[in-house]
Amino acid sequence: MPLLINRKVVEDNWTLINDDAFSEEGAVPAGDIIVPLALFTEHKESLAARNNQVAIQVNGNDDLTQVLENLEQFPLIAIDFPAFRDGRGFSIARLLVRAEYKGEIRATGDIGQDRLAYMERCGFTAIQISDDLFKPEMLNAFEEMSNYYQSATDSVRAVYHQ
């Protein structure tokens, strides 16, 4: 899956794992991994013993209290957009920015071209797009709008302030 950072496609060094990786002994891949929050909570001790970095994936259904209390523990927080109509990930990204999270905030899931600029404005520092949706011309989405009606994390002044 293409990963966009700074509006460019880059190599992804992280592997998203799921329930199956914990069902078989030793099946968790080597290297840096992203674990859904529920699995992270369930396997916290074994994940802490790893030599590589461990990040988490959250979605709108997760209780973020534990995450917000331990932000420095996570080098990356992936926010899942399970469906186009679910916009809670935008609010989660803003919440992380307001909490002064310094790591990578990554968008994953159902992401189309029309959301890219908004994701960047909400504080996402990386956007992962599925292979079947990605087209190189999607990168033009970041330049399609030059004026905005509201302020955001990107410090672009809203139209009414100009």
Image: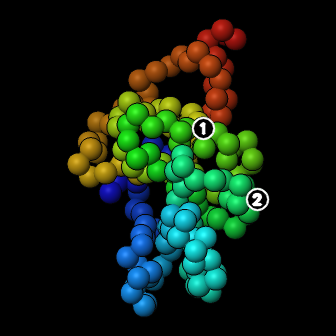
* Circle 1: element type: helix
Count of numbered circles in the view: 2
* Circle 2: element type: helix
For residue 126, side relative to residue 20 (left or right) = right
Q: Amino acid at mark 2?
A: Glu
Q: Amino acid at mark 1?
A: Ser
Q: Residue at x 68, y 59 (%)?
A: 67
Residue 76 vs residue 4, the one in the foreground: 76
Q: Is residue 38 above or below residue 47?
A: above
Can see residue 139? no
Q: Quadrant of the N terminus?
A: bottom left
Q: Residue at x 40, y 62 (%)?
A: 11
Q: Residues within 10 Å of mark 1 (few under 14, many from 20)?
A: few
Residue 28 vs residue 102, the one in the foreground: 28
Q: Is residue 16 above or below residue 20?
A: above
Which residue is farthest bottom?
Answer: 25
Q: Quadrant of the C terminus?
A: top right
Residue 33 vs residue 59, the one in the foreground: 59
Relative image position of residue 128 (x, y in whole percent): 41, 51
Cα distance between the residues tagged 1 and 2: 17 Å
Q: Residue at x 52, y 59 (%)?
A: 57
Earlier in the chain: of badge 1 and badge 2, it is 2
Q: Residue at label 2?
A: 69
For residue 49, side relative to residue 120 (left or right) = right
Which residue is farthest left?
Answer: 132
Residue 107 vs residue 86, the one in the foreground: 86
Relative image position of residue 138 (x, y in whole percent): 33, 37
Q: Quadrant of residue 19?
A: bottom left
Q: Residue at x 58, y 74 (%)?
A: 42
Q: Is residue 77 above or below residue 88?
A: below
Q: Residue at label 1?
A: 91
Q: Residues within 10 Å of mark 2 (few under 14, many from 20)?
A: few
